[in-house]
Image (cartoon, rainbow, N blue to C red):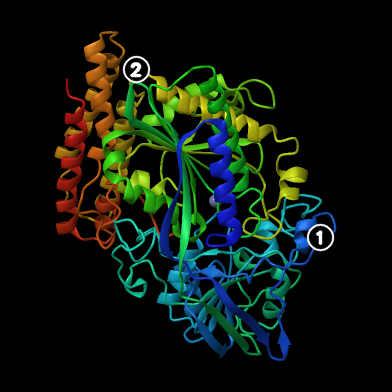
Amino acid sequence: MAGTARNYELAEYIAKQWREYGLEDVKLIEHPVYLPWPVRYEATLADEKLSLKEEPIPEDKDSYATDVGIPYCAYSANVDVTAPVVYVNSGNPEDYDLLAQQGVDVRGKIALARYSVPYSYRGYKALTAEKRGAAALLLYSDPAEDGFKKGDVYPFGPWGPESHLQRGGIVYDFNLPGDPRTPGWASVPGGRFLPAESAVSMPTIAAAPMSYKDARKILEKMTGPTAPAAWQGGLPFRYRLGPTSDKLHLVIENDKKVRSIWNVVGRLRGNERPDEWVVLGNHRDAWVFGGVDPSSGSATLMETARAFGELKRTGWKPRRTLVFASWDAEEFTLTGSTEWGELEADKLKAGALAYLNVDSSASGNSFTAAAVPALAGFLREVAREVPDPSGGSIYDAWLRNTQTPQSKEPLVTTRLGSGSDYTVFLNFLGVPIADLTFDGPYGVYHSIYDSFTWVDRVGDPGYYYHAAMGRYWAVAALSLAECDYVPLDYAAYAREVQTYLDEAERSARERRMQLDFAAVREAARAWEKNGEAALSEARSGDRARVERAHRGLMKVERALLDEAGLAGRPWFKHLIYAPRPTYKALVLPALTEAIEAGDTTRARAELVRLTHALNRAATAIQF
Ligand SMILES: [Zn+2]
């Protein structure tokens, strides 16, 4: 976990290994950040104290560890309350509306929400509970979501056993990631800091995670109306809305300390273009052991760095600089990457070609890539070059997994929300990003059972997918470091943005808002045309023209930022993508939010701002 002595030891270990591999300028970079740790978590139902502990499993020696700390939700407020509990299903606004219709009052009571699949960020559940006036929020793992209802549980399968619980941050980092005390600048020793409490990212509600082993005792005591069918979980009784017949005494206490976190950054300096950077990053901190999240990615990063070291030993030098980063405190609020991005903002804005993120590299065998639309074609090309452990290329396997009747190509997720370390690069700096993983059934996320043994027995026996990700990541990074021009396809990006404009226009029409999309569409079409032209210039073979195209292409993603940022969250500057509070992607965020609010005046202003951004993007590649 971030801030621990063991985490610091691992930072030193990584730095030592990287130096041995031959990486240059390897440094541990310190950031003092607001990083609360748990002090107390107790839940007593009538006279029964709930265990709030994960049970050891004989097959996994690490599950016997006693020094794993109190399970908690980072950035939870503190609470000591005795109140009845209400079942709020997934804890979304419509769930609270249903409770209100059924006459169940949540105010002043403890809300019990289940984690839900598809994934919705737990911080959104906290924000919703806070707005609805709950006294506190408990987040439990229902067996229907990630336990025995899905299949075999660990150690016999990938799903979560009875007492597993999912830790995690509840911080509102969809408003502001990174140290809440330094919005938009880096936290450095002796630097300038605002009070954490006043940050737009700080929850005022208390929350904590729970296993279904404990939550079932609460659920069994629910009175009131029967919950709707969609709210019924995997436990063998009828779920009711509540409140509970007995009160729960809940104590959650976290300290409010500033602690040092440590990014490890090393590089291979570019021989021809040292100021142009290709950045590879993965976080190092975990909630417990982090077998998959993030250590599968960290193992892959180490192997990738080692391979580049081997290449260097043959006398090879990259044309551009390769930067390797082991981020700290991602689990808290994307903290390490955000602080480093803010620290190196000028250099990254001037010279970063792309940021390639791998968080968990392998919880299974389904290749998944998220990226800006300009990188999608490049990621498919790379996939053709790398073998998949199942036979054939990653491209073949990826196509099989994501094929629909409409698609002839593997699917790159281009609607970008948040949830990992690429956020600062995309949303604050305007650097093209990709986020890569091999996915699979994985029910032990953020629990003690996300361990070495889980990966070894269940997730990736033989480590074939770890190795495949290493090859993929290395080929992608090497291609970008060596290319004559950065292979960014802005015609594809512009076409995609035109579909977002279709959606925005439709949604405005449904609300009977009078908005004129002519100018923004014209800008998008010019951008598309220039995107085509830039790639043919880049392929012209003429040195001067290739170079001019390359320099233009590097500026385009930056041009999509607007320094004023989004309403209420100025840190987020990208006008095509932002996260919703659920972490889901919000496309054309400033415009879409204005339309969703039914605010025609604001929507008109946002159309102008978006038109300017698209014109800037088009102009950057006008030849
Ligand atoms: Zn992670």
Indicate whether 498 appears above or below 284. Answer: above
Specify whether 435 is left or right of 59: left
Indicate whether 11 appears above or below 75. Answer: above
State the image coordinates of residue 241 (x, y, percent, origin top left).
Answer: 60, 78
Is disc 1 in contact with disc 2, using a CB cutoff of under 8 Å? no
Residue 361 visible to the viewer:
no
Task: State the quadrant of the N terminus.
Answer: bottom right
Disc 2 marks a residue whose amino acid type is Asp
Residue 467 visible to the viewer:
yes
State the image coordinates of residue 543 (x, y, percent, origin top left).
Answer: 26, 11
On the image, which quarter does residue 298 sit in?
Answer: top right
User: Residue 8 or 500: which is nearer the viewer?
Assistant: 8
Tell me the distance, in whole angstroms, between the alpha carbons under discs 1 and 2: 53 Å
Residue hosting label 1: 57
On the image, which quarter does residue 469 sit in?
Answer: top right
Residue hosting label 2: 484
The disc, 1 or 2, on the residue closer to the chain's N-terminal end is 1
State the image coordinates of residue 443 (x, y, percent, origin top left).
Answer: 67, 54
- Does dot 2 land on a helix, a strand or a loop? loop
